[in-house]
Structure formats: C-alpha cells, structure tokens
Image (spheres, coloured by chain):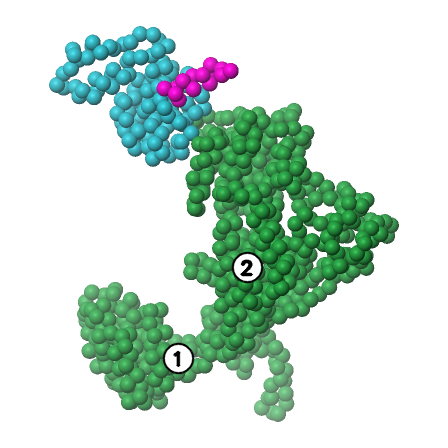
Chain colours: A cyan, B green
Amino acid sequence: MLDKKELLKEQVIRASGVNPLKCMRCGKCSGTCPSYDEMEYHPHQFVYMVEMGDIETLMKSESVYKCLSCFACVERCPRGVEPAKIIEAVRLEAIRQKGNNHMTANDIPEKVNDDIPQQAIMSAMRKYSK
Amino acid sequence: MQRIGVFVCHCGTNIAGTVDVKAVAEALKTEPGVVFSTDYQYMCSQAGQDIIKKAIAEYNLTGIVVCSCSPRMHEATFRKTAAAAGLNPYMVEIANIREQCSWVHKEVPIGTEKAIILAKAAVAKVNLNAPLTPGESPVTKRALVIGGGIAGIQTALDIADAGFPVDIVETKPTIGGKMAQLDKTFPTLDCAACILTPKMVDVAQNDKIRVFSYSEVTEVGGFVGNFEVTIKRRARYVKEDICTGCGLCTEKCPQKKVPNEFNLGMDNRSAIYIPFAQAVPKVATIDPNHCMKLKTGKCGVCSKVCTAGAIDYEAKDEFVKEKYGAIVVATGFNPISMEKFDEFAYSQSKDVITSLELERLMNAAGPTGGTLLRPSDHEHPHTIVFVQCVGSRCEACAEKGKEYCSKICCMYTAKHAMLIRDKYPDTEVYVFYIDVRTPGKNFDEFYRRAVEEYGVHYIKGMVGKVSPEGNKLKVQGSDLIYGRQLHIDADLVVLAAAIEPDKSARPLATMLTASMDTNDFFTEAHPKLRPVESPTAGVFLSGTCQGPKDIPETVSQAGAAASKVIGLLCKDKLTGNPCVAHSDEMMCNGCSTCEKVCPYGAISYVDKEFRMPDRTTKVRRVAVVNEAVCQGCGACTVACMSGAMDLKGFMNKQIMAEVDAICK
C-alpha cells in the first residue's frame, strides 16, 4: 500500500508522463527558463523534488503559477525529460485539490484580443483549469 | 679543412616569400670551407635530393648545410641523401630558415638577413663536425614481466605468442592480481574470474612462459637488450614441482585462524594455503608467520597428510640470475588505507567497508558465498550508502589521500549499485558523488542505466560524517541540488577508496633507473606519443603502475607494451644513437656529479690506471659512459664542472662556434 506521499508522486508521474530518473541534472531547463527570477523552485528542482517525492512543498509554492508554459525547457532538454509537463502536473494536482475551474472554455472568446498572443490564452486555460 | 656545400630551399613560397633565397646562397659562398652554394624550389623532393647527391660527388664535399625547414621535419631525409652519396650522415646540418625565420618575419630584408646568419652558424658547426658511427650491441631474446596481474598476464601472453620466452615475477603465491578478487566487470557485467582464469591457465600451459610466483626482483644490472636480473624466490616450504594442489594439507592444517588476505581479512585461512581455487601455479604455500611447525617445531601435520611428499620445512630462499633483453613493469595498485578518514568511521564499524571488500562480499567464492550480508551481524542490508572520491581529488589532505582522480571508482560504484538493486530490489541504494566521470565506450550509458532502470539514487554532494548508532550507521551528507542536508540511516556504507601504486614500485624504479612522478606512478617516455615506454631504454610500462586504469585500458596497454618488447627482441643487434656523451678521462676529476644528474643511469665510475709524465702510474676514478644506455640528453655536459663531459655531435666547441657565427 502506497502512503500519501508516494501516491501523489505516482499521480504526478502518471499525469505528466515524465520519468524524472532520466534527468542527469545538467540544469539546462533552468538555464533556459524565462521565468527563472520569478520562481522560488526552478524547473530542475521540480524534476528533482518529484523524484524525491517532495511534491507538497511544490504545490504550496507560487512557482507552479509562475511557469509560463512556454515549453522552452521541454524543447531544450538533452534527455527528453520534459520539465514543463511535470510542473503542469503538479499545478493540476494543486488546482484539483482546490476544486474549482478558474477558467472555462466559455471565457475564451471575451479574452481574445489582438494585443494578447493566442498561445498565452491557451496557457492560461491550461494553468487555471482542472 | 672541410669542403662544404650549401643548399637553400625555397619551400615553394613558404621560405622564398619572405627570404631572398638567391641572396642567401650567394652570401654563403664566401664563408670559410664553403665550396658550393645553390638554391632550389623543393630540396626535399627527389630532384632536390639529386642536386645534393650530384654536388657531393662533383665537388667532393665533406659536409653539407641544408637551409630549409625544422630538422624535426627533414633532417632524417637529408641524412639518408648524404649516406646514399657516400657521405657520413652526421656531416649534415640543417639551418632552420622556415619555422624560425620565414614564418615569423614579414619583411624580406629582415628575413634574408636572419637566414644568412642561421646558415653561417650551421656552416661554422659543420666545419667542426666529425663523422660518427652508431654503436651496436647484441639483444638477449628473453623478456621479464614484473607483476602477474591482468597487465602482466596479457603482456606475457602477447610476447610469448610472438615466439619469445617470457618470465613473470609475482610476489604473491599466485598470479591473477586484483582482477582475480573482483566479482563482475563493467560495463558488460561478465564475471571477472570467468574471463581471467582462462588467461591464467594459458600462462601456465604456455611453454614459452615461466612463472616465478612468491618471488621478487632484488637486483637489476645491464642495459637495453642486456639486462641482468636477480630474482629472489622466497621459500614456500612446498616443492612446487611435486605439489599436486590437492588441498588436503589445507584442510588438515590445525592452524586455521590466519586472516585471509585474498578476502581482505573478512574470513580466515589455514597456515598452509592455496589462495583460491583457480590459483596458478596451483600449489600450496606455508605462511612462516603462522605455521606452528616452523615457529615452534611442533606439528608437521601437512607433511604427514601429503601423499606426494611435497612439504619441505628446510626450504631456503633461492636466488635466480637471468639475462633479459627487455623488462616490462606491471606492478599494479592497491586501494589506499581508510584508517585516517575518521569521518567515515571505517575503523569504528565493520559495516563501513571499501569497494574491494564489497567485491569479495558479493563474490560466490567470497566469505559469504555471494550473499550480500553485513560483516557485523550477517544480516541483509536494506539501505546502502556509497561514498565516491574517498581520498581521491584530495589536494589539501596529502597525508591521507591523493591529488589525482582514481578514474575507476565512478564505474565500479555504478556497477555495485546496479548489481545490488538487481539482486535485492528491496534495497535502497544512495550514491554520493562530486562528479560522475564516465568517459569510455558504453560507460555513460551504463551509469545512466543504474539511475534510470535500476533506480539508484545519485546525490550530488559529499558525505560529511558517518556515525555508528546501535546497528545503524547515521549518514550525514549534503544534497547540493536540493540545497539541504540529508540524514540517512544506513545498514552498510561503502567507500570508493582512492588507488595508489603498489609499494614495491618505488624501490623497483630505483633498480631500473626508471623515473616516477610524485605519486609514485612510473613516467612514460612521452605522455601522448610514447605511452608504454619508460624514458629508460628497454623498460616498458603496463597497467596501473603508469596511472589509474580500468581493465579494458590495462589490457590494451599491456598489448601495446608487448608489441614494443617484440619490436625490440626481433632485432639481432641494437643500433644506438651516436650522439652520446663522452668523457675525457684526462680532464675528469671523479666528482660523480654527472652520475647523479644522468636520468638514464648511463654513467658509472671506474678506477683506472694512468701513466704519468714521470713514468709512474696513478689510479684515478673516472666517469665512463655506457653508450647503449645514454640517450644524448646532454644533462651531464652542463653539470660537469671540469669540462670533461661532451656530447658527440653537439660538442661544446661546436655550439660555441655557432654562437660566435651568430654574434659576428
């Protein structure tokens, strides 16, 4: 029987489809991250802490919302670890525990605006919906 | 007076672009001794060489100066040209007007002026040159390999395969070395004994190879092609040629409490013993420090049970003298002592072990029969912590560790971690590392497999402290990526101890006059281009005596050393370099300075009788150079205070003449 900590780890790994053991800790994800200065925990720490099973700390941190979902880390990882997907999975876990969808598909049309890239709206959708 | 020809090369535009080659040839015509001077586009070409040959014959030249590229490039070419025309090759001098002149100057007048000066210096030298003939010495067609580990075994097999007799000298009762103690080998995980013992049997069965086990080299004399070596065969109190290796004596021996060095003291053996089942030679040896018969005169059980009658309590050390053409050093390594690393509690807890001890604990022929059990209570360990770089890369603690990287630890630790996770999946394995260094074919993939497939926890950081508490080992270390201190309750701690050259290497290097670095690793003749030769002619290096190495590297170096030995033994006679040191006996004052500075051991002193002007005789101590050993480095000529030592081909007066010509 898995304990709560292990269950959470299992859930994040399954939701993200990421194997954190593949990480060789080069730090290229954090090296490439445009949001680095905003984050308390950086992309490489997300991967490492998920491997260590320390997910609750990540869920409580603002860092999950600071990720821009730009996927630069996924693009550049030499081992194909996909850190952004792990961050997304942790965030999803946090949002699910809180309950509500903070943005639905119906909210999208009113947000479409020539000054905002459509990718940002999609990112917001990913970020604030379970 | 010499008759000198000067040949100035254009080297296309390499030289002619910044040097007025015609002006150089013209200016040299008036130099003393010069009877012919010319220039040509490519002197090294066949046509250019023909010009030289023709001029030698036509002008009856006694010496030539070629103004061209560096002597490194074409000195050998032009010496051959001269020899083909009947001129002594050592009457050729090269004036380097390319690398040191045309390539470094931009303006033609400056380049031309310097080229003329360099050519004049070469002419001044040739005026004092004398024909030199290389000496010859015979070659004894037998090789000696010192050390019977995988390096020595492979070298001996390869030399014997070429048809030359080889002797292996091994201090232990059996050959096999460290590899015989290993369980599995990376990166293919095949069993060490399965790949090593067939080679040991090959050694035993090869009629070209003699194994002097339980023996050591005590004296080395002579020089390349003609070494004279004394080998001490320690008394093993068992007649090697009669013992059948049945092992009955080892079973019946009443003294069974001797720490077994093959299992690193983790179990006991009897006083008469065979180190392991596949030992070569498979004969028993009596340990005189523990045998009751030898110590007190009471016992004699082994001689009673030995049906072959091989036991001989009266045996004495024997000395064998043998001549060899080449010597290969393969003395290997040992892990350093962990006693001084108090922080890891090696001396306090039996459950803190070295990686070599772990090899024995995991080996089917080891003290636990291959089941991994803690040495203290024989329980299965469930949490194991590996600590890398213990004593390696340890600059500040010279009395404890070594400054260098031991190279093999990253890979064997990955191997250990992987094997443990494979065999005991309920075991948590942590590896604390500073860097993971896995260059080598399939090496990094191997380490990644330990992490990704076997789930070994690699933690970037060092263990700071291990403290035994109850039946646990409290491990305190840092996790630099996580940024916090880790505390792990471990059952077993494995230290990847640094490796150091065997202690026998230093006295051996003195005997061989082979040089060593500050860490007691043998120095190679050139770190890149002559990696298996020692700077001392006829002495070759194989395996970890030269530097930390894994098995694949050791075996390839062993083969390389063997091919160098074969190349030497194939020759019937050795042609030396005639540019060797020579001592003027009349000027030598016997001070021994040259003997001390000679890196090759080529200089010795003899007492010689001299006839004095008043018809009396006087015995004086003078230096004698062994021309077969001298490499012509010139250290002695500089050190000699009385000016007696000179280097043929580079005599002091020749060099002074060059300097004078340049300064004129």
| Image point (30%, 33%), residue name | A76
| In the image, farthest residue toward the left | A114
Q: Is residue B116 above or below residue A123?
A: below
Residue B374 image position (x, y, % from top left): 64, 32
Percent across and percent down for residue B518 are 53, 54
Numbered tag placed on residue B653 in the rendering? none
Question: Is residue A107 visible to the viewer in this orientation of the structure?
Answer: yes
Per the image, is A12 magenta? yes
Tell which subunit mark 1 falls on.
Answer: B
Queried whether the magenta region covers residue B459, the answer comes back as no
SS for dot 1: helix
**Residue A8 is drawn in which quadrant?**
top left
Q: Which residue is mark 1?
A: B90
Residue B506 vs residue B186: left or right?
right
Q: Which residues are magenta?
A: A1-15
The numbered mark, 2 or 1, whose residue comes first in the sequence reads 1
Q: Residue furthest right?
A: B298
Contact, mark 2 vs mark 1 (Cβ under 8 Å):
no
Question: B464 or A98, which is in the foreground?
Answer: A98
Q: Kindly identify the residue that appears in the image at 58 percent across and 56 percent down.
A: B153
Query: Can you identify the residue that label 2 sits on?
Result: B155
In depth, the one of B1 and B378 nearer the eye is: B378
The secondary structure making up most of the magenta span is: helix
Which quadrant is the C terminus of chain B positioned in?
A: bottom left
Residue B358, located in which quarter of the rendered image?
Answer: top right
Q: Position of residue B476 (x, y in %)?
A: 54, 28
